[in-house]
Image (tube, rainbow, N blue to C red):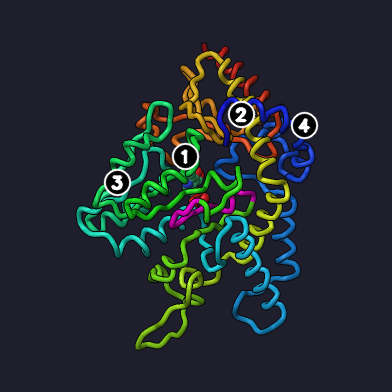
Amino acid sequence: MTALPARREAAATARAEFDVAAVRAQFPILSTTVHGRPLVYLDSAASAQKPRAVIDALARLYERDYANIHRGVYELSQRASALHDAARRKVQRFLGANDWREIVFVRNATEGVNLVAQSFLAPRLGPGDEILVTEMEHHANIVPWQLVAARTGAKVVAAPIGDTGELDLEALAERIGPRTRMLGVVWVSNVLGTVNPVEEIVALARRRGVPVLIDAAQAVQHQPVDVRALDADFLVFSGHKVYGPSGVGVLWGRLEHLAAMPPWQGGGDMIERVAFEGTSFAEPPFRFEAGTPDIAGIHALGVALDWLEGLGLEAVAAHEAALLAAAEDALARIPGLRVLGAPKRRASLLSFTLDRVHAHDLGTLLDLEGIAVRTGHHCAMPLHARLGVSASARASFAVYTSAEEIDALARALRRIAESWR
Ligand code: PLP
């Protein structure tokens, strides 16, 4: 998540310090084959693969410590509850949050945004109000706001990006008006890799009294996070992109907001007292966690965060910066290949088009060589429309990506470019 010259400099150091072979050995799926070729997995931005520690944590919980949580007086339920509570504290530590009650477990980043839209924002919206997002948002940070806007007569407006794929901060500031009730902004674009200056953006919105939600789905796996320093109102991320299981995600919210927000789903575990005459609700975070949660998934998410922190997020960032620099160099030499955007700060992913080859065909041709990349609109149709392309291919890099895999991608792309000329 660094600027280009720094990325190149980081490359040499990272190669020396980061033992990618030792990391790869912890991911069983990386030694499998696809179409008889060793798997080259370059779709971690869609979902990361899981290390042995996470796979084992899931199995161990079911084998030894599994029961429903916060319900039983018996030993096993107490043990499962303690693991669950510990996972929440791990997320608190990972995000640098002030209080464990600020951590709400949801299914994924998408559900976190929906929760904020429906519980926090909808009661504050009226006809003519505006929800500001940006042109580079994932659908998860557009559609939940559109749903509440449609119910309330509000509208969703988008701040523009420039041709390099960076936000135009002046234009964004101008779009914040007296009717702006919320700003939703992605930290790292899942298409361009652009790293937005979220601290600056939050400060801008805060001066105008506008609450901010940060979509950190592509950010927290690449660099250290500190929600206290960010000073936003809400932040969401998904467990499956940060080496944890799918089915679990996190909403972080300022405690004063969460304490004032009504529940958005009703059921067991989110109440204080239930009677047919009326029901009172539990304090946050439980008020927002109706029903039995993903007990094993939440535990394994805590293990994934421990595991990632064990590698050191600074070391991870340097390793990925090196991969990105290598990929940028290699792809720039492929005839007819166009990388989308050229932001000064980019996380470890690149989206591109290749002349005369549709993105889906490109994905299929790469797959035949064992190389998995994402193709299509990457759940960012408005951004693709803004860039004037209907689809692109995306290669994304993670802790286990090796320099050899970048070479394999570049070789395959060159072959395809030459044979389709
Ligand atoms: N935001 C961004 C930037 C993403 O890349 C994604 C997923 O790709 C999401 C939100 C939604 O994540 P999930 O599908 O896990 O809710």
Eye-nearest disc, 2 or 4: 2
Q: Would residue 20 be seen by someone viewing this image from the given angle?
A: no
Question: Which of pointers 2 and 4 lies earlier in the amino acid sequence?
Answer: 2
Please tell me which of labels 1 and 3 falls first in the chain.
3
Q: In the rendered structure, does residue 34 fall within the stretch colored magenta?
A: no
Quickly name the residue at label 1: 196
Residue marked by disc 4: 16
Residue type at mark 2: give it.
Ala
Picture coordinates of residue 259 (x, y %)?
A: 43, 71
Q: Residue 234, labelled with which disc?
A: none
Q: CA distance from mark 2 to mark 1?
A: 17 Å
| Residue depicted at 39% across the width and 30% down the height | 390
Q: Position of residue 372 (x, y in %)?
A: 61, 34
Q: Would residue 8 appear left or right of 270 to someone viewing this image?
A: right
Q: Residue at x 67, y 24 (%)?
A: 408
Q: Which residues are magenta?
A: 230-243
Residue occupied by mark 2: 6
Residue type at mark 4 is Ala
